[in-house]
Amino acid sequence: MGEVTGFISKRLKLKGTLATVCTAVSFFVIIIAVAISSGFRQEIRNGLSLAGGDVRIIPTNHDYLSEGNPIPTDAPYFEKITELPIVESIYPVIYRAGIVKSGGQIHGVMVKGVEPSHPMCPAEGELNVRVPQSLCDALELDKESSVLTYFIGERVQVRKFKITEIYKDVLDNKEMCVVYAPIATLRRLNRWEDNQISAVEINLNITSEDAIKSATGDIGM
């Protein structure tokens, strides 16, 4: 545990690796438009949209390192968003920063809880996870490996996850590995109610930069 605690202290001092990069548009939510440069290849844009949505709603005071500040899925603006013609899908998600330990090696990750309908949801099972290839390379993991993951909040919590799928990172970002887990697992970890989430990721049926900017304005109104 001392090794993990020391690592946590170092990770917290890094230049915002686990911090949210976003702009507040109201006292309650932040809308993030993932507007991809036209110079990027289409598959890169599609991969980034899959990873975080085209537009994201997240609390202004969200803390990736604790269980605090959820938002409700039954808020009035949800109905408004679903009625927008440009909206293709809406995914509620829960984010928690964690530290994966395998043997004598450790690595910081972002664990993202998703519903079964999400394309990246792992195979059925409370502790099953889908992990990026970069994490497997860094910690010498493979499919069916079990990994201990430490979550730091009011107290240190540990979960032993089983890798059931491995995916190729869109940008091969070894500093920010996203691990996908069932959203119910993250709710239990945070001791949240069934209607509480960290954020809403919205995918659009038109994904040009102008369309994303326009949708962001419509959602933020």
Image: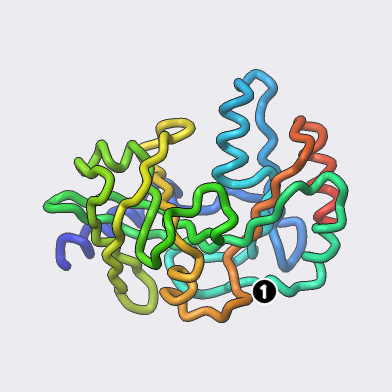
Kindly identify the residue that appears in the image at 71 percent across and 51 percent down: 89
Quadrant in which the N terminus appears: bottom left
Q: Is residue 191 left or right of residue 71?
A: left
- Nearer to me, 69 or 170: 170
Farthest left residue?
A: 104
User: In the structure shown, which secondary structural element does the residue marked by tag 1 occupy?
Assistant: strand
* Residue for badge 1: 72
Q: Is residue 85 above or below residue 46?
A: below
Apparent side of residue 65 relative to residue 142 in the rendered image (left or right): right
Residue 216 lies, in percent from the top left, at 79, 47
What residue is rendered at 44% in x and 76% in y?
A: 188
Instruction: Name the residue at 19% across, 53% down.
Output: 102
Which kind of residue does numbered mark 1 sit on?
Pro
Q: Is residue 55 above or below residue 26?
A: above
Residue 168 in the image: state x and y as whole percent: 41, 34
Q: Is residue 44 left or right of residue 17?
A: right
Image quarter of residue 75: bottom right
Q: Residue furthest front?
A: 124
Question: Where in the figure is residue 127, as x and y percent of width and height?
Answer: 35, 64
123 lies left or right of 5: right
